[in-house]
Amino acid sequence: MANATSGVAVSEECKARFQELRAGRAHRFVVFKIDDAMRQVVVDRVGPRDAGFDELTASLPADGCRYAVYDHDFTVSDATATAAAGEGGEAPRSKIFFVSWSPAAADVRSKMVYASSNEGFKKELDGVQIDLQATDPSELTLDRLAFPFCCCCRCAAASAAAADTAPLPFELRNDPTDSIDLMGISLANSSSGVAIHDDCKLKFNELQSKRMHRFITFMMDNKGKEIIVDKIGDRTTSYEDFTSSLPEGDCRFAIYDFDFLTAEDVPKSRIFYILWSPDNAKVRSKMLYASSNERFKKELNGIQLEVQATDAGEISLDALKDREDNMRTQNNEDNSTQQSGGRSKLEGVK
């Protein structure tokens, strides 16, 4: 089945191995990777039931991204557990962790593909309970998993207070279905992506329908919670003005209304959508922008071409022209194929 978010398919073996872990408890962990062609998520490694957490972390490459699921067993010792387990006050629990492994040494494009495919892949794995994103081994330790955890986290906090320990590093919510974040761990049932400010769609519609702007750049706010308008270029601004508005050390989304002449000197325009993710940007920023990319695009109805760029050379004016030429050539070939197919069908009718 294709991942609707990024176009990366998910092999049936991935879902089969996950179900063996979740329902049959046949495995301790499963590691997944995107194949070399960046077309499909496949199973990389499977850890037997007696495998330790160290074996999972050792299976993750220092210079390559991976997805993984880990079935973590632990015990709780709160009031709920006491009622359930009796005198001892302890009850066994397990949680299935989904791990997004994106080390700093991994290729930038690989990070972007994994980040943009993350939510779509998780949806194929029905039963994931907690999401952990890690960029180095220190963010992927058993200590981060080994805490008393219940559905609303209040029992965990009470247990920590009773033991005279520091409070757990997450915010208590009144609604247990709310997103809970602890040092980068978030409950997987929370909605993915970030909010989109209404001004983003308003300005895009002004560019698309009224042609009031030449370009718009968008950014995440300082909290990483909402996409907002960053800069707007009027119709008189040049392409150099646009490219210079993109920061060298941070990511951006952008829209550019590209005017050009065809080989027949017919004026045309295309609306380009650009995901700008330079090499100098922070890894977490790259992952956040990549994972929010598809959702944001869906809010901007009318995009015709997309470019993902990590340096200025990939969004040069010539690069945009080449993309437009390729699109036009592909459309002509598709139309020719359809017309040829139609003639062939008619020729067979007597």
Image: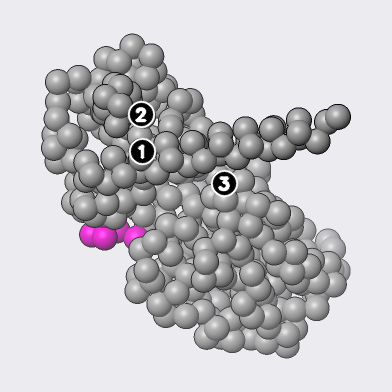
Tell me what residue is drawn at x 70 percent, y 64 percent: 11
Residue 333 or residue 143, whichever sits in front: 333
* Residue 287 drawn above or below residue 23: above
Q: Earlier in the sequence, mark 3 or mark 2?
A: 3
Q: Position of residue 91 (x, y in %)?
A: 78, 70
Q: Amino acid at mark 1?
A: Glu
Q: Which mark is residue 126?
A: none
Say which residue appears at 49% left-offset and 52% top-offset. Answer: 116
Residue under label 1, please give it.
324
Q: Is residue 255 above or below residue 58?
A: above
Label 2, secondary structure: give it.
strand
Out of 350 and 269, give the one closest to the viewer: 350
Q: Does the stretch in magenta take in 280?
A: yes
On the rendered image, what quadrant is the C terminus found in? top right
* Residue that badge 2 annotates: 270
Amino acid marked by disc 2: Arg
The answer to whether the residues at label 1 and label 2 have Cβ atoms under 8 Å apart is yes
Q: Which residues are magenta?
A: 278-283
The residue beneath circle 3 is 5
Q: Earlier in the sequence, mark 3 or mark 1?
A: 3
- Distance between the alpha carbons at the discs numbered 1 and 2: 8 Å
